Image (cartoon, helix red, strand yellow):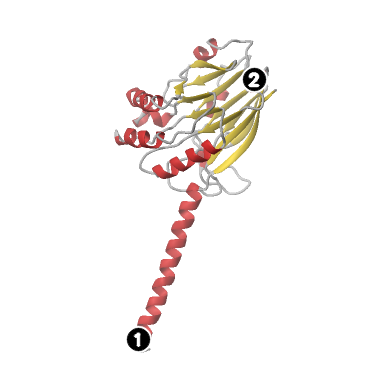
Amino acid sequence: MNRRQFLARAGIAGAAVGGVTASGMFLWKFTLHHLEVVQQTLPIVGLPSGLEGAKLVQLSDLHVGPQVDDDYVVRAFEMANALKPDILAFTGDFVSWRGPQQLVQLERVMQAIPSAAIATIAILGNHDYGFGWRQPEVANDIVKVVSNHGVQFIRNEVRVVEGLNIIGVDDWWAAQTDVARARSQANADAPQLVLCHNPDVADQPVWAGYRGWMLSGHTHGGQCKVPLLTPPVLPVRNKRYAAGAVPVGDERTVYINRGVGHTLPIRVNVRPEITSYRLVRG
């Protein structure tokens, strides 16, 4: 092989390696950011007639921070906005906390928050409580930033939306959960819906008399799974709580949203998710 042939073949090999690398990078980014809009019917006993057919859009686990690209979160907001939600619900983990820079990032992405015709509500997740989930001052700063964009947080209390009592439960891992306090503020005869970041709370002995749905996140669907098998890593005690609608008994159902963001930059067979619910009378 002469010098010219060697250089030509080396160039071809280099281009091939570069092409494979570029393809790999594209595939990696694609799997992380391949958002799916999941359509789900949400039956609620006694749902007010004014909310029949209304659309509730759930966004969960944004994880604004060093691992998740701000522009990707903005694109998720644009997709949610295109769904034209009547009610927009955030179910925790706005950030992956590393320091005050996450507040700057959060403010930037919240400029693109979807608009909702009736109400925009939110609860907090464990990552919103800073390092070790034990920094309530971090949670309070996140609440301030997000609230400035028209979002009402529900922290162990109730927000009444057009006659629907939405019970917001604070985070379990952060030791802030007080279901009894939250439920005591709801009208027992009114239609109810629960928002709670960690689905494990559904197994606590605090739900006597509640018949309905709880919307959660937290698991990211495990981020990686083999088809037909449970994801090998789930941050919950009850491994049934991976993703989607899970009946809990006593006429209760938990819906686990797979989240928009991620904590580790990998997703395999677990797409990020925006959930769009159509409210119907149960």
- Pick out the residue farthest to the right: 282
* Residue 153 point in image, percent of width and height: 45, 22
Whole-number angstrom distance, CA of label 1 to CA of label 2 = 77 Å
Decide: is 104 above or below 177: below
* Residue 60 point in image, percent of width and height: 49, 34
In this rendered view, identify the residue nearer to me: 88 or 134: 88
In this rendered view, identify the residue nearer to me: 128 or 106: 106
| Residue type marked 2 | Gly
Give the class, few, some or many, for how many residues have Cα within 10 Å of label 2's Cα (few <14, many ≥20): few
Position of the N terminus, as image quadrant, is bottom left
Decide: is 25 above or below 229: below
Mark number displayed over residue 105:
none
* Residue 91 point in image, percent of width and height: 49, 29
Mark number displayed over residue 4:
1
Residue 68 visible, this orientation:
no
In this rendered view, identify the residue nearer to me: 75 or 26: 75
Decide: is 54 above or below 272: above
Residue indicated by mark 2: 50
Q: Is residue 271 left or right of residue 92?
A: right
* Residue 270 point in image, percent of width and height: 55, 45
Give SS at disc 2. helix
Q: Quadrant of residue 38?
A: top right
Proximity of marks 1 and 2: CB atoms separated by less than 8 Å: no
